[in-house]
Each structure stands twice: as structure tokens, then as C-alpha cells.
Amino acid sequence: MIRTKTVAFTKNSTNIFFHILTKCNLKCRHCYINPRQHGKNTLPLPVINAWLEAFAQDSNSKNLIFLGGEPTLHPDLPAAVEYARNLGFGSITIDTNGYLFHDIISKVEPGEVDYFSFSLDGTTRETNDRIRGAGSFDTCIAGIRKANSMGFATSLIFTVSSANIHEVDRLPPLLKDVGISRFFIQIIGLRGRSATGSQTRIRDQKLQVAKSQWLNTIPRVARRIAELGVTVTYPKVFLGTGENFECAGLVADNYFVFPNGRVYRCPLCEDFALHSLIFKNNRLVPADKLNERDLFQLNIAEGCVMNKLIQPGNLSYDSAGEPEHKIACCLLKEEIRND
Ligand code: SF4
Ligand code: SF4
């Protein structure tokens, strides 16, 4: 039976999104990595290990996601995976654009890495490569097949924009063919490259999708994919009447760690010096005020305060000046699975 549920925030489970470097071989149009805010460091292995230890100390179950840049460009990634496993992290995921550098796939075991999570932004070579770069479609598909053939579980992240929404109906057969077990849909935002003027457009095309396009397309396609036995997760984005707004910064336990030591609790804050924590001498300590924690407290009719500050185009108002809908926390997800 197909079940849809909103994944509730919880403080009992910790998610650590660990950017171990910002270097990448690709230059995707919507990349949110911002070297001015996130640094250009490649963290040495002893520092990675020390920071992992800082998160390993409490009793919560912990999901660790290694990201970059392209994390497989880091030659010590296998050693970092092994260290994290020994520290007791509950699940370990490696996000990758599919290039799988340093033969990572032969240097870690399916028992150590729960998922290799690939990124693709089109169901055709033409669309994907226009967004992510020449050759990236074929490389990603080959990477998924190779990971599956070696016994790894694989997931796929697809960032929906006006440049690829016309292709989402082709996703179910593609996912079935390559053997994906979890599928994550994201929505193009206004972070990173996509926030900087000309890069919000590809060949003069605005990348953000309209509310009606999103609602008419994504839940329907997500259901078709779930019917194939693939668990699908996508952001809720718009809250319906009567649905509660919650800010993950207050009610969840997420950490977005960057190689310059900044640690955020909210991904929409990452383009600003608003991090609430920072690594100093390998110790995680509170950052100076004002920071994102001060924003999380603000209770506004539009829902997410960061959305109102940096993506006001997502909002609309009625004739009395009241918001027509609340914008959900960007971390609030719908999950569809076939139980
Ligand atoms: S693969 Fe990821 S890190 Fe690299 S350019 Fe693309 S979005 Fe950015
Ligand atoms: S996206 Fe908005 S609601 Fe979510 S953590 Fe950030 S500020 Fe809070």
C-alpha cells in the first residue's frame, strides 16, 4: 500500500551534513557552494576525525552524510568513513556527482557505507549536461550501475527547476532501470550560484518553478515512483490551511558543517555569516551573535523567516495584506513509500 507522511522533526535523531572540502570537478548551475562563505579548504584527516568525535559524544542516533564539493576528491575519505563507523554513527552516506574519484568504490565496503547518493538533474543527456556539465549524465548513470553491481545501496537526488520539470514524468522508468532504492526531490532555491543574477537563468530561462507547476507535478510523479518500490522524499514547500509551521532550527537536530569551521543549523543561512556554531581548535563552540538562532525565534505570518528575507518572491498576499500561504521550513519533507 502506498503511504504518504510528513516526516516530523525530532531532536532524538541527529543529521550531520559534513562538507569535508569545497573543491569540485563540476560547475553545476545551481551549486550552493559559496567559497567566500564556506572556504576553499580541504580538511586534513586528523581534523575530520576530531570534528567527527565532537558529534559522536551524545546518545542520539546519528546519520552522517559526507559531502563537498565532491567528497570523493578527498583521498582520505575511506579512512574518514572507517573512523566514523568506529565512532558508532548509525548511518553513513556519501553524496557524489558520480565521478567516484580515487576508486572510492573499491576502498569502502557495503557494510560501512549505507548509501552512495548520486545527483542527476535531467532524465536525458541533453538536459542534465546543460545544467551539470558535459559528460556528467553518462558518468553518473555508469557510477550508479557500478555501485549497485558491487552491492551498495544507491539513492538519487534530483533538483527540480524550470529547466528539467518537463522531464520528471520520465523519471520512473529511469530509476527502475538503474536500480535506485531511495529518491530525493529537491526544489531549486535562491542559494549559491542560483542566487547570483545571470545564473538564475539558463539561456534566459528562469529556474524557479511556480507553485501550481510544483503541486501539479511533483506529488503525482512521486507516487508513481513509490509504486515501483522506491522510497521518495520531497520538500513540502507550501503549508496547507491548518497545518502547523515549525522551524527545524528550534525543533530538530541538524548540523551543516563547512571546512572553514562554520556550522549552521539552517541551510538557507549558509550564504551568510549567520552560523550558530563554529569549530575553534577542533572544539565546537557557540558563534558570536547575531546569528541564525536569533532568527529562528521570530514568529511571522509567512512561516519561514529566512524565506521571507532571501526568497520573498515565493510569497503572495491577499487584498487584506495577509499571506495566501505559509512557506514550510525547507527541511520539512513528505515521504512516500510502498509498504
Ligand atoms: S557536483 Fe555538487 S558541489 Fe559540484 S558543482 Fe555540482 S552541485 Fe556543486
Ligand atoms: S529554513 Fe526557515 S524554518 Fe527552516 S530552519 Fe531555516 S529559518 Fe527555520
Image (cartoon, rainbow, N blue to C red):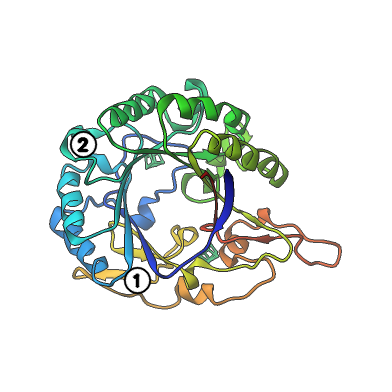
Residue 94 image point, x, y percent: 30, 44
Tell me which residue sits at (46%, 49%) in the image.
192
Mark 1, secondary structure of its residue: strand
Q: Can you identify the residue that label 1 sits on?
A: 277
Residue 137 image point, x, y percent: 42, 25
Residue 106 image point, x, y percent: 18, 33
Q: Nearer the viewer, residue 3 or 35?
A: 3
Is 300 left, or right, of 126 in this rendering? right
Closest to the camera, between mark 2 and mark 1, is 2
Up-down relation of residue 161 to residue 20 (above or below): above
Tell me the number on the disc at residue 104: 2
Q: Nearer the viewer, residue 221 or 276?
A: 221
Image-quadrant location for residue 271: bottom left
- Circle 2: is it few (<14), some (14-19), or many (20+) Cα within 10 Å? some
Q: Is residue 163 visible?
A: no
Residue 83 image point, x, y percent: 16, 55
Tell me which residue sits at (62%, 43%) in the image.
208
Q: Nearer the viewer, residue 256 or 337?
A: 337
Query: Which amino acid type is marked by label 1?
Result: Leu
